[in-house]
Amino acid sequence: MLYGVNPVLEALEAGMASRVYIYSGRRSQAREIVERATAAGIEIKVMHDAGFFDSRFPKGHQGVAADLRGSRTYSVEDLMNIPAEKGEPAFFLLLDGIEDPRNLGAVLRSAEAAGVHGVVMEKRRSAPIGPEAIKASAGAALHVPMALISNIKLAMRAMKDEGIRIIGAEAGGDARPWSADMTGPLALVAGSEGRGLRRTVSEACDIVVSLPIMGKVNSLNTSVAAGIIVYEVLRQRGA
């Protein structure tokens, strides 16, 4: 299940909602959801007990939730076909162990907004694509093609074999993002909130970039750093 007005609207837009739940006290504020679900022939259950939502979701559920159909799964090979289909240079995001679902959701929101062709993350050592991550992504997680794999380094190797440059993002990197050439096919690798990129992942990158820190804190939140760098890619590509 997922919760919140925007995520449920995005699930309806993506054709991934199978049933919608609305708290009776919020029905008038959820008119668009009711209209879209009705038009799509999706069952709507009006719940008169707010405890249905409070017992399942954290604050911010807005009295709206939905059951999801199974989402499409992608392989790394599937993802690498997408740029050619769109006639664009490859633009991928690889996530090395992001464990906070809210951070994951925020990263996916930036990725979808910037037109990233696909996201690759490991099945283990990563936050799940669950209700909290989907909520934090404002539903963007339902639109970004994602591949869940066992070893991110295998994806890096496969992309390198296809001429895709691998750019790591970590404090203390070799260069600033605006000094690196990001106009060609690339995959950006972002690390976990605490330890950053694993050493073996960092060593497998073609270059590692970092953002300048001018204040007293010694690092940026992963989702903030990833958002800045993916938009630097768009700037260099003339978007």
Image: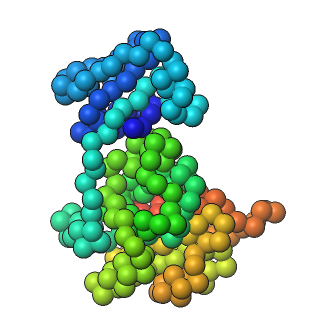
> Which residue is pictured at 48% across the width and 78% down the height?
167
Residue 238 in view here? no
Furthest residue toward right: 216
Query: Is residue 164 rendered to the left or right of residue 29?
Result: left
Q: Nearer the viewer, residue 90 or 80?
A: 80
Q: Position of residue 35 (x, y in %)?
A: 27, 20
Q: How many marks?
A: 0
> Which residue is pictured at 28% across the width and 84% down the height?
162
Q: Nearer the viewer, residue 140 or 131?
A: 131
Q: Nearer the viewer, residue 217 or 184?
A: 217
User: Colour scheme of this structure image?
Assistant: rainbow
Query: Is residue 116 rendered to the left or right of residue 52?
Result: left
Query: Is residue 148 rendered to the left or right of residue 220?
Result: left
Q: Position of residue 77 (x, y in %)?
A: 24, 73
> Which residue is pictured at 44% across the width and 12% down the height?
48
Viewport quadrant of the C terminus = bottom left
> Which residue is pictured at 54% across the width and 62% down the height?
98
Residue 57 in view here? yes
Q: Is residue 110 above or below residue 95?
A: above
Q: Nearer the viewer, residue 1 or 29?
A: 1
Q: Position of residue 134 (x, y in %)?
A: 44, 45
Q: Position of residue 11 (x, y in %)?
A: 32, 38
Quarter where residue 185 is shown: bottom left
Viewport quadrant of the N terminus = top left
Quarter where residue 100 is shown: bottom right
Quarter where residue 6 is shown: top left
